[in-house]
Image (cartoon, rainbow, N blue to C red):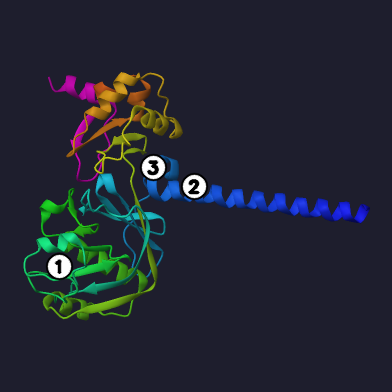
């Protein structure tokens, strides 16, 4: 009887332990999902308020890519430091880019295009699903280079500067040719991939396909974060996919979890900050101005595309204005 009770107790303890372990894994997964999908890689909550920048170093293979869709900003990181950021175009609302983690396993110069069996292919004249359209053919929308991300998602060449900061593709990331070449060559150099610069230059000048496999997959985190405190500055980006992320409640949560005291701003002020954002602009304000109740006075809108600017403190701006009178 006593032995039986011991066995039952042991079984119960193992069951509880298994349940706790399962809960832990689930919690970790939830954190992982939140990090990858809904938290900008530039958030103070992840960086501690400081992003270290560095020059690119060949032969240093610890690299990754990130993209916050609402900011249209793709960043190459090396050894945990920002090396280069690029402005990009992304998927249209009806064909949104995948939000989450992808992997790049190869780089292809002069890629052929095989139109998928999708409804939008019918809008391309002279194109049939399954047809192989070679590089250089004007019907091929991929341009000179593509980086496959799995499941038909790609990074590939933009049709022009108008693609940048816009919803233009069928789920892919588009980059200017010069930026795409720069990114690809940095990946090759970082990983010391077995392809010479001569072969790459030949591929640029010709239409012959050149495919280079990556030694290990390159991680690409794609997130969707419209409310970001970066370097103690709040950025409100447009909700380009209409996911209802720009609300007063979410903005308060972002401020509080980023260590910003929001007690000096009321809901009406926060709503005005959100409403000032358009499809082409973002709202920018120092956290210190929010804490001093000067969010609207010191905040301003900026063009959406381009590098985020660090606003000068309000006191310095006012002093500068007086000096210029």
Q: Nearer the viewer, mark 3 or mark 1?
A: 1
Dot 2: few (<14), some (14–19), or many (≥20) neighbours within 10 Å? few
Which residue position holds label 3?
43
Relative depth, front residue between 92 and 270: 92
Q: Position of residue 173 (x, y in %)?
A: 24, 58
Judging by the rendered image, the residue that carries numbered circle 2 is 31
**N-term-proximal mark, 3 vs 1:** 3
Query: Pointers 3 and 1 in contact (CB under 8 A)?
Result: no
The residue range painted magenta reads: 300-325
Front-most of residues 122 and 10: 122
Residue 254 lies, with reference to residue 192, above or below; the image says above
Residue appearing at x 28%, y 35% in the figure: 236
Regarding mark 3 in the picture, which secondary structure is present there?
Answer: loop
Report which residue position mark 1 lands on.
143
Q: Is residue 286 above or below residue 188?
A: above
Going by the image, does 117 lie left or right of 19? left
For the C terminus, the image quarter is top left
Name which quarter of the figure residue 97 lies in.
Answer: bottom left
Q: Residue furthest right?
A: 1
User: How busy is the neighbourhood of tag 1: few (under 14 within 10 Å), some, or many (20 plus)?
Assistant: many
Earlier along the polypeptide chain: callout 3 or callout 2?
2
Give the spatial CA distance, label 3 vs label 1: 33 Å
How far apart, in angstroms, are the residues tagged by discs 1 and 2? 37 Å
Residue at 43% from the left image edge and 48% from the top image edge? 35
Give x and y (percent) for residue 234. 32, 34
Q: Is residue 117 above or below residue 258?
A: below
On the image, the x and y values in percent for residue 196 come to 26, 80
Q: Secondary structure at mark 2?
A: helix
* Residue ID at (6%, 70%): 126
Label 3 environment density (alpha carbons within 10 Å; few <14, some 14–19, many ≥20)? many
> In this view of the protein, can residue 82 be seen by the observer?
yes
Q: Is residue 311 magenta?
A: yes
């Amino acid at each position: 009887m006593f032995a039986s009770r011991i066995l039952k107790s042991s079984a119960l303890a193992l069951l509880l332990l298994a349940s706790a372990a399962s809960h832990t894994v689930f919690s970790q997964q939830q954190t992982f999902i939140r990090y990858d999908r809904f938290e900008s890689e530039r958030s103070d909550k992840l960086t501690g308020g400081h992003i270290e920048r560095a020059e690119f170093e060949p032969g240093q293979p610890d690299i990754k890519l990130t993209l916050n869709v609402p900011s249209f900003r793709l960043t190459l990181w090396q050894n945990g430091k920002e090396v280069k950021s690029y402005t990009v175009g992304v998927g249209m609302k009806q064909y949104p880019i995948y939000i989450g983690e992808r992997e790049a396993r190869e780089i292809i110069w002069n890629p052929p295009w095989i139109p998928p069996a999708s409804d939008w292919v019918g809008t391309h004249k002279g194109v049939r699903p399954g047809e192989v359209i070679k590089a250089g053919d004007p019907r091929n929308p991929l341009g000179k280079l593509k980086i496959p991300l799995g499941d038909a998602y790609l990074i590939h060449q933009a049709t022009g500067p108008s693609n940048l900061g816009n919803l233009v593709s069928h789920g892919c990331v588009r980059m200017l040719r010069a930026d795409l070449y720069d990114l690809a060559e940095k990946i090759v150099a970082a990983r010391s991939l077995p392809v010479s610069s001569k072969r790459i230059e030949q591929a640029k000048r010709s239409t012959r396909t050149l495919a280079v496999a990556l030694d290990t997959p390159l991680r690409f985190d794609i997130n969707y974060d419209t409310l970001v405190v970066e370097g103690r500055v709040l950025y409100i980006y447009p909700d380009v996919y209409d996911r209802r992320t720009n609300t007063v409640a979410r903005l308060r949560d972002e401020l509080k979890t980023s260590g910003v005291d929001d007690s000096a701003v009321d809901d009406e002020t926060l709503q005005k900050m959100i409403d000032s954002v358009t499809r082409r602009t973002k709202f920018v304000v120092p956290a210190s101005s929010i804490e001093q109740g000067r969010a609207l006075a010191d905040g301003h809108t900026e063009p959406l595309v381009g590098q985020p600017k660090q606003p000068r403190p309000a006191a310095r701006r006012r002093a500068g204005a007086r000096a210029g009178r």
